């Protein structure tokens, strides 16, 4: 691997699905050696997710397991647990999202592992936290992050429509960033004290953080109403509109008084500047529906490409409602470092969403097959060739 910030950092990814493993992926992007622990046979159940009907390609797996090494291990077997414990003894970070009762049965709870290595950062991720009646309850981002925290209820076009379903990983990836932040904070503490420790996060807590604006209003005793239909938007200058070719874009003119004149001039409606219905912020709020009707008619007169040129020309803030296909061809995605090529040059992947000046990320290596690195990982841990054969014979490793 290319030398990077976390080169030499040993991470054990003993998690499944998305959030926990994605946090390990973020560490791997900066050079950490991540050992992915998987069950024998089919491996992590996330491997079986098929985003394209009729195709068994592991597209999702390539995103969340790049740069990792796979060790297929039977953690129900005492010898399998012994292998994991040996790895933990020299590891820096251990990440798991196994349900709490499962951790106890497999002897990989925090109390089991931190006693083996006082410098270990044990990252615990759950659906609903680790205390209370629902501590052992399982959940996915769609249930715990999206639905339970009010986000699903709030994110709909208006009060008359059904709640919106989340996209795959929509809550997992932000939650992974939270886990990564906790791990790095603990590593900083370890630099100061020499000691590791346990860090915890959950889908529930990350989802409530994402919905923090609405929740904080309610915490002060105010009701939080569902958003009105776009035709009744309280601010016509922070609304979404459709162009002549059927494309949507959203305006975000929050510095209204300064931007209003240049905006109305750009769209060819300078006369509205002196219209008493729209002359002040308060007047625009009172007559927002009328302004929406006017802007609907204006924006329906040109294609999106024309409006992008016009609005960019006067420095106004807006964003097109892009399709996923457009994101792939968006040059700014590559300039920003959001899309990068795999190390083999075949295709692109979505990269960790931040950069550190002077620190290079490693090239994105393809995700491993189940147990691809069994031999190498075990030998590095001090097992002899005969030891490895014995473990194979016992069915402890693939």
Image: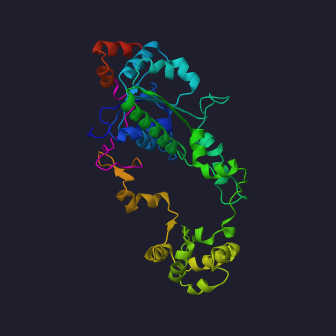
Quarter of the picture containing the C terminus is top left
Magenta segment includes 359 = yes
Query: Where is residue 129, by image quadrant?
Result: top right
Horizontal placement of 49 versus 342: left or right?
Answer: right
Q: Residue furthest front?
A: 192
Is residue 395 something that shows in the picture? no
Magenta segment includes 219 = no
Q: Residue at x 28, y 14 (%)?
A: 384
Foreground of the two, 188 or 231: 188
Q: Residue at x 40, y 47 (%)?
A: 352
Q: Residue at x 35, y 38 (%)?
A: 67
Measured along the vertical axis of the image, is residue 124 above or below residue 348? above
Q: Position of residue 297 (x, y in %)?
A: 61, 79
Query: Where is residue 312, by image quadrant?
Result: bottom left
Q: Position of residue 76 (x, y in %)?
A: 49, 17
Measured along the vertical axis of the image, is residue 39 above or below residue 304? above
Q: Position of residue 17 (x, y in %)?
A: 50, 36
Quarter of the picture containing the N terminus is top left
Q: Residue at x 34, y 41 (%)?
A: 30
Q: Position of residue 61 (x, y in %)?
A: 44, 40
Is residue 154 something that shows in the picture? yes
Residue range (magenta) = 353-374
Query: Where is residue 270, by image quadrant?
Result: bottom right
Foreground of the two, 142 or 280: 280
């Amino acid at each position: 691997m290319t030398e990077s910030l976390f080169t030499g950092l040993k991470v054990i990814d003993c998690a499944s699905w998305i959030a926990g493993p994605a946090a390990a992926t973020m560490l791997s992007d900066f050079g950490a050696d991540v050992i992915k622990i998987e069950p024998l046979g089919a491996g992590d159940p996330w491997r079986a997710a098929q985003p394209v009907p009729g195709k068994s390609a592991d597209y999702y797996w390539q995103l969340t397991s790049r740069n990792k090494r796979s060790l297929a291990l039977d953690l129900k077997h005492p010898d399998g647990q012994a292998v994991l414990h040996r790895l933990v003894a020299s590891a820096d970070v251990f990440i798991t999202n196994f349900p709490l009762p499962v951790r106890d049965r497999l002897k990989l709870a925090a109390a089991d592992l931190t006693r083996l290595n006082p410098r270990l950062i044990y990252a615990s991720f759950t659906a609903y936290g680790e205390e209370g009646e629902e501590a052992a309850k399982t959940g996915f981002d769609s249930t715990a992050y999206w639905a339970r925290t009010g986000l699903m209820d709030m994110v709909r076009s208006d009060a008359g429509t059904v709640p919106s379903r989340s996209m795959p990983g929509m809550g997992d990836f932000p939650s992974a960033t939270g886990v990564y932040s906790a791990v790095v904070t603990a590593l900083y503490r370890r630099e100061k004290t020499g000691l590791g420790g346990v860090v915890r996060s959950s889908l529930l807590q990350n989802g409530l953080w994402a919905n923090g604006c609405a929740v904080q209003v309610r915490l002060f005793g105010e009701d939080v109403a569902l958003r009105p239909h776009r035709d009744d938007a309280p601010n016509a200058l922070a609304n979404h509109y459709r162009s002549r070719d059927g494309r949507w874009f959203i305006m975000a003119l929050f510095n209204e008084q300064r931007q209003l004149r240049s905006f109305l001039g750009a769209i060819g409606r300078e006369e509205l500047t002196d219209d008493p219905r729209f002359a002040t912020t308060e007047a625009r709020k009172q007559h927002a529906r009328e302004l929406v009707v006017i802007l609907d008619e204006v924006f329906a007169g040109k294609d999106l490409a024309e409006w992008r040129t016009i609005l960019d020309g006067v420095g106004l803030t807006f964003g097109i409602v892009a399709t996923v296909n457009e994101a792939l061809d968006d040059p700014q995605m590559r300039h920003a470092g959001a899309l990068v090529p795999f190390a083999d040059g075949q295709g692109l992947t979505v990269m960790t969403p931040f950069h550190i000046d002077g620190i290079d990320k490693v090239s994105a290596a393809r995700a491993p097959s189940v147990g691809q690195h069994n031999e190498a990982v075990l030998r590095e841990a001090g097992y002899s060739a005969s030891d490895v054969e014995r473990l194979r014979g016992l069915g402890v490793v693939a």
